[in-house]
Image: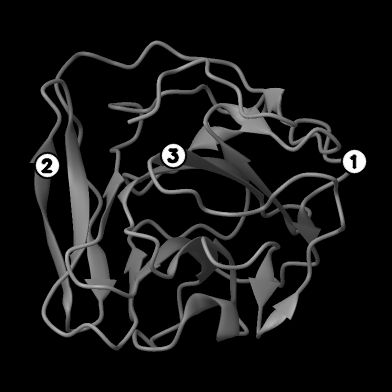
Amino acid sequence: MMIPGVIASGFKPASISTPNEGTNVSLPAFVAGTNMIFDTYNDGAFDYSRATRGAGTTDTDVAKANGAVSTGKWYIEIDTTLLDNMTSEIGVGHDTVTDYETALYLQSSVWSVSNDRTGVYTGGVDVSNGVDAILEVVEGSRMMIALDLDNGKLWIGRDGSWNPSVDPPGGAVADADGLTAGSYVPFISLFKRDTYMLIPSLSDGLLYAPPTGFSYWPGGV
């Protein structure tokens, strides 16, 4: 895991929170493709939902979390612990999506970033606003998502930093906007066997505080 407070070049810092060291709250549940395996991982301090790509190495497996929301401003963290330089994606999308075998960037009701392309993609199209920083998943990073469903806006951060030209609390500039109305959940996808991501539960295990006016995702992620 990355060390809180280490800011990647070209990014601006987010607020750093003190993780809750009390009793862990419920971990998120998922619906996933046939080769995705979920278990509980403990890093010595907190429990996480661990998503691992199981048998079969040529297909993509997608998973979506519980806790759909259709309004409000929400914050999510996902730890990209071991991706092995293979295609892996994180994002948000409509809870009605049931295709668990197609890469997220190709799905028209999901907005995602990955570790093999730069930008926010939906339906195979880069819809990012051209802000001046990398929108990309990096192995071993703590990825951050800020989702404003009241205004259809999405921001992506990494290791405690947001892109320098965007402002999640103010909402003036987003990494992507125009997200369509609907009930949203977090999505992840993994391509290669034995790669995995860690998903904290609410404030347990999170490294950073949500932007002002945003709340932790209500479904456990």
The residue positioned 67% from the left and 62% from the top of the image is 118
Q: Mark 3 points at which residue?
A: 141
Q: In this view, does 207 lie above or below 25?
A: above
The answer to whether the residues at label 1 and label 2 have Cβ atoms under 8 Å apart is no
Colour scheme of the rendered structure: one colour
Look at the numbered disc 3 and give the secondary structure of its residue: strand
Circle 2 residue: 41
Residue 152 visible to the viewer: yes
Residues 109 and 198: in front is 198
From what the image shows, is residue 119 above or below residue 104? above
Q: Which of the two discs, 1 and 2, sits closer to the camera?
A: 2
Q: Which mark is residue 172?
A: 1
When asked about the image quadrant of residue 117, the answer is bottom right
Q: Which of marks 2 and 3 is nearer the N terminus?
A: 2
Judging depth in this view, the residue of 186 and 121 nearest the camera is 121
Locate the N terminus and report the quarter of the image it occupies. top left
Q: How far apart are marks 2 and 3 (CA)?
A: 17 Å
Give the SS element for disc 1: loop
